[in-house]
Image (spheres, grey):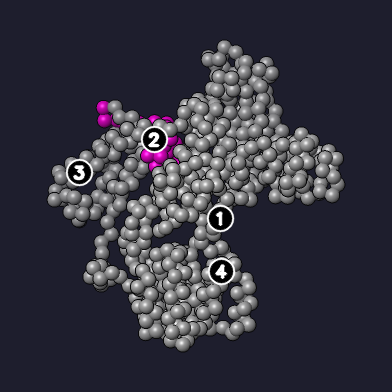
Amino acid sequence: MNSMNKPAYAAICTHSPTKPVLIFVSSRRQTRLTALDLIQFAASDEHPRQFLHMPEEALQMILSQVTDHNLRHTLQFGIGLHHAGLNDKDRSLVEELFGNNKIQVLVCTSTLAWGVNLPAHLVIIKGTEYYDGKAKRYVDSPITDILQMMGRAGRPQFDQHGKAVILVHEPKKSFYKKFLYEPFPVESSLREQLHDHMNAEIVSGTIRHMQDAVHYLTWTYLFRRLMVNPAYYGLDDKEPEILNSYLSRLVQSTFEDLEDSGCIKINDGCVESMMLGSIASQYYLSYMTVSMFASNIGPDTSLEVFLHVLSGASEYDEFPVRHNEERYNEALSEKVPYMVDKNRLDDPHVKANLLLQVELPITDYVTDLKSVLDQSIRIIQAMVDICANSGWLSSTFTCMHLLQMVMQGLWFDETSCLWMLPCMTSDLVESLRRRGISNLQQLVDCSKRVLQGIIGSSSVSWINQDLQHFPRIQVKLKLRKSDKDDEKSSILNIKLEKTNSKQKNSRAFAPRFPKVKDEAWWLVLGNVATSELYALKRISFSDHLITNMKLPSSLPTFQGLKLFLVSDCYLGFDREYSIEELI
């Protein structure tokens, strides 16, 4: 890659000596190395600041606002950096400088081509390969990415034409010349994703028989391309019999894989969805993910195992692991509460596990953590449903607590609940512990007068203000017999009401979580002594809610039966109510 920096500088001098230039590179590290080489080449030509187009006073004012030290250095020479490792403020500043032609050159990763509208007179694509952490080697960039990058060449209202330079290894030169000057057909990728599509259609009831699936495929783009370009899909001919045989084999193998994973059941050509298939469809998860869950989760699964199962989901298969990143991962592995396999530090799933466990030491991982957390919520919710459908009370609670920890960015221990308050300090935590308060629920339930007596009048106002972010819920329960004559079961009526004066919306307070999320709760019927779960209901409400749950009629007595109210985002807000006391 570094050998392309000199040709890139020459291309700038030849095709765009004074107009804006975008240089696309394969990684964040390459943005820095490329910019430094361009600075060196410009200095060799005795024009080190030829790409800078603003006075020194304005430059110094801008540099004082930049937090990334590499960006601060390159901006002095009119060269900007743009990648996901920069914070939002630095990225916005660079975009503004380049858009206003204050800096002439912007070195960036391919994400800029898709996300931000910053055209330039000249676009240089420095290499057509990137490091694939999953394959552990360099692979070709998608053609669509190359086209998108080239499309940034030419500024409307400023240029009559734009220029694009692709720097590529000699063996691939003829391929890209053919690609640039001749149209390429768009082929279908449905085969690689067919299992999850089929599973979703089976769950929805669109496909009930194997022949329904074959008919379904005839309406897809895959079928259109089979008739036009059968050789691409491994067929010698496009006769109807051959196409029908191919589709039948494709459906058969797909159904067999889904059945082996426990997502569907096949009986005499008829197909029906199973619990795992429904959960995969509901949470948009891969069939392989839910199958892996079923194999690794049991009645008393520990938090450590749940973390490994979560990070092992197929949804993290494409999680980016960059070249030589394993040394950062090794440093992270020394700080985590639960060990990871140190022989697989370049594995996407191991990296996801590490990011879920530690506070980040490097800026580059901030965006990666957002990506991990973004996927984690629906994956954990699916694990909760699998545990609940299996009747495992202990594992269900552990999984729910894992979701709470992910939402708050805190480990679940005796004092972690107090740290959900932004104003909390170590001294205040110790003071509260001495007075027997170890969780936030106790503080929320305290009156202002009691709170003032505990922590003093000087601190009570701002702590009370922070406490308004959290819900204070009043629960009323009533047990009644079923209205149906043929049923002997009992119905539990549940009334929930938020009594906060200000907290009347359902927005969750989770400042460490990168996305906005609404509060939700689980109502769980179970017996702790036997670790059995009988029913689960997911609810959400803004100020009040009335609902009910049917109690299991098979139970000879309600002894030990409890209703649990569990938050999906707050630590230490779980409540339990004895059903036996309602009789």
Query: Could you tell me residue 26's position as x and y percent?
Result: 39, 64
Where residue 120 is drawn, which disc sits there? none
Give the SS element for disc 3.
helix
Give the camera-side residue of 495 and 62: 62
Image depth: mark 3 or mark 1 in front: 1
Q: Distance between the residues labelled 2 and 3?
A: 27 Å
The residue closer to the viewer here, 130 or 350, is 350
Q: What element carries label 2?
A: helix
Per the rendering, the mark at residue 69 is 4
* Separation (CA) of disc 2 from disc 1: 34 Å
What's the residue type where badge 3 is placed? Answer: Tyr
Q: Which residue is drawn at 41% across and 69% down?
A: 24
Q: Position of residue 370 (x, y in %)?
A: 52, 53
Residue in the picture at 55% in, 15% down: 555
- Would you place residue 13 above or below residue 513 in this image? below
Mark 2 and mark 1 lie on one chain; the one further toward the N terminus is 2
Q: According to the image, label 1 marks what residue?
A: 361
Residue type at tag 2 = Ser
Residue bearing mark 2: 291
